[in-house]
Image: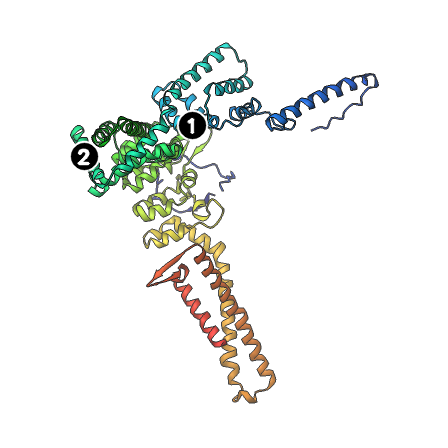
Amino acid sequence: MAVAASHADPNSKSNIEGRSPPPPEGAVVIDIGHEEQEAPKQKRFSWLKGSHSKKNSKKQSFQGAVGETTGIDITNAVVPKTFQDMFLFNSAVMGFGSKVWMHDILLAFDQIVTNVANTQRLQEECDVLALSMSKHHGPIVLSEYKAVMLASLRSLVRNWDSQHELGWSWLWENVERMLKAVLHKPAVQQKALQLFYNRLDETAMQFVRREVYIRFFAMAPTGQDYFKQSTTRLHFIIDKMTSMTMEMYQSPKSMVNDLSAMGLRHVGYGIPVEMFGPFVTAAVQTVREISQSEAELEAFSWSLDLISRILCRVITEGSTIVMKAINANSAPLLRKAVACAPRGERAAWVLHVQVGTQSISPLMWAIETGSLEAAKAIILDLLTIRADRDRYYYGVDILFERHPDIVKRLCVDAPALVPTLLDGLIWRSRTTENGQRRVNYYVKHLLVDEQGDFCKALEWIAENDDPKLVCHPVLAMVTDMIWGRVAFKTFMYGRAWFLFTLAVFVFSQSIVNQVAEDMDEAPTGLRVQIFVCRCFVYICSMGQWIVHHARNIVRDLRFKNTVKVGCLKIPEYLMEWQGWTSLLLTILLVTMLC
C-alpha cells in the first residue's frame, strides 16, 4: 500500500539519494476449450474388441502380481517425475523397499552429487552418512543402492548413453570406497568413547579444562585475543566440546544442524578458521595423557576432527564480504560490499546468509552485536529506490517479510536507528509543481502484519517513551489514518454506550429516588421504572464487564501472560489503568447487586 499526499515543501529535498521517481500520475499500483465429441465406432473394427480385452486382462493380471509383491497399486499410480520419487518407486519394485539405510543415502545424495569435485566436502558427507547408517541393524550391501540409482536415472535422463553410465558408476564407486573405509568404525568407537567418559572423574575433567588452554595458547598465542571470557565460560566450552564428541556418534543429523548454527554464530564473532587446527591438536594431546587405549583416543580424535571440519566449512561459506564489513562495523566497507550485488539481489545479500539448513540475517546480527554503523548502512541501502528498464527495486517488503518485528527489535536494541527506518518509508519528488512537492508514504507494514491483523508497530513505538519519535511524519500520518478511518467510530460508539448506561444508572439511583419521599409508599409505576432501570444496568452494563474481564483473564492465564506482583501472578491486561479501573467498577456493581 502506498499512500500518496502532496503538500507545500519548497525547501525540502529527497531524503534518500538515488531514488527513481514513482510511476506516473493515474497509474494504479497495488502493494498490499472446445469439447471434442467422440466419433462413433465403426462396426468394421468390432473384431478388435476381443484382442483388446485379452491384452487388458493380461495387463491387469501383471499389475495385480506387482501389487501383491511390492504393496504398490500401480494401476492408479502417478509416474514419478523426480529422482527421489523414482528411486522410492524402483526400490519398492526391485524388492528393496525394506532397506531403511537406502533412505539415509537418498537424503544425502544431493549434497554428495553437488560436491563431487570437492574431495574434503565429499569425505565429510560420507563420514556423517556412515554415522547415520551405523544405526541400522542388518547387512548393508552398497551395490544394491547403485542398481536402484542407475535404474532411476535411466528412467529420468533423456538420451542416456554409455558416458552417463560410466560417469555415475564412477561417482558411486568413489562414494562406496569412502563409506566402506569408515562404515564399520562408528559402533566400535562409540562404545570406546562412552567407556572413556564413564571413567572420567571431576579431577580428570579439571585437568582437561586447564591443560587444553595451556597447550592451545602455546601453539597459537593469538588465540588469547578470542578467549577473553571468564574462567567459568572457558570451562563450559571444554565441557560442551566433550559432550559434542559423544553426541556426534549418538545423533549425527541433529548435530550437523547444531554445528551449522554454531558456525554461523562464529562467523558473526569473526573467528578465523586457522584457530581450529591448534585447538583440536591441543585437545587430542591432552586426552592422550589420560586415555588408557588407542581406541579411546582414536574415537575422540575422529569425532572432534569431523566437528572441526564442519565448523570450518560453515564459517568459510558464511564469511561473506557483508559479514566481514559488519564485523569491522564499517559503513564504507559495507556499501562497497553490497555494490558488488545486482539490484535484484542486494536485499538478499544483507538479509540472508544460508549454510546448509541454517541461516542468519546480517542485519539482525549487526543490531544484536552493536555494529550500528553497519546496520544503518544496511537499512539505508534496503530503503533506497532503484530502477532499471523493467522494474523498480525497493526492499521494504523483503525487509518486513524477513523481520516482521524489525520495529520492535530496533526500539529495544537500537532506538537510534528507528528514525532512519521511518525516513526510508518516505519518498519525496525532486520536482515541484505550483510550489508543492509530491510525497509518497509506504506504510502498509505499519498498519497490518503478514496475517492481515493489526500491526503492533505503534504499540512498540509507544512503549519506547520517546516524545520526539512519535512526532515523525510517518507515525503522524499512520495514527491520523487509523484514528480517522477506523478507531474514531468504534471509540465514539463505545463511549456513547458507556455514557448511556451511566445516565441510566444515575437516573435510577439518584433522580427517581427523589420523586417519592418514602419508597414504601411510592406508586407502582415509579417502582417499575426503578426496577427496569436497575435490571438494564446490572444486565447490560455489569454483565458486559463480567464477560469482558472473564475473557481477558482466561486468555492471559492460558497463554501465561501474567505479571508477578509480590507472591501473586496477575493477568497482564490489569497492568494498564483502563483494565484495573474497569475491574474495580465491575466489583462495585456486583457489590451493589448483592
SS class, disc 2: helix
Q: Which mark is residue 211?
A: 2
Dot 2 amino acid type: Glu
Which residue is more in the foreground, 324 or 52?
Answer: 52
Q: Is residue 145 above or below residue 326?
A: above
Dot 1 amino acid type: Met
SS class, disc 1: helix
Instruction: Tell me residue 351's x, y (percent).
Output: 37, 36
Residue 547: tell me if it is visible. yes
Q: Quadrant of residue 435?
A: top left
Whole-number angstrom distance, CA of label 1 to CA of label 2: 35 Å
Q: Is residue 131 above or below residue 31?
A: above
Question: Around disc 1, counting alpha carbons within 10 Å, would you say few (fewer than 14), some (14 to 19), or many (20 or more)?
Answer: many
Q: Is residue 135 above or below residue 581?
A: above
Instruction: Tell me residue 217's x, y (percent).
Output: 17, 32
Residue 347: tell me if it is visible. no
Which residue is more in the foreground, 149 or 432?
Answer: 149
Instruction: Tell me residue 161's x, y (percent).
Output: 52, 11
Q: Which residue appears at 38% of the width and 18% of the height?
A: 117
Total tally of numbered discs in the picture: 2
Instruction: Tell me residue 16's x, y (percent).
Output: 35, 38
Q: Which residue is mark 1?
A: 133
Dot placed on the residue nearer the N-terminal end, 1 or 2: 1
Q: Quadrant of residue 321?
A: top left
- Compared across the picture, whether 55 is left or right of 507 comes to right
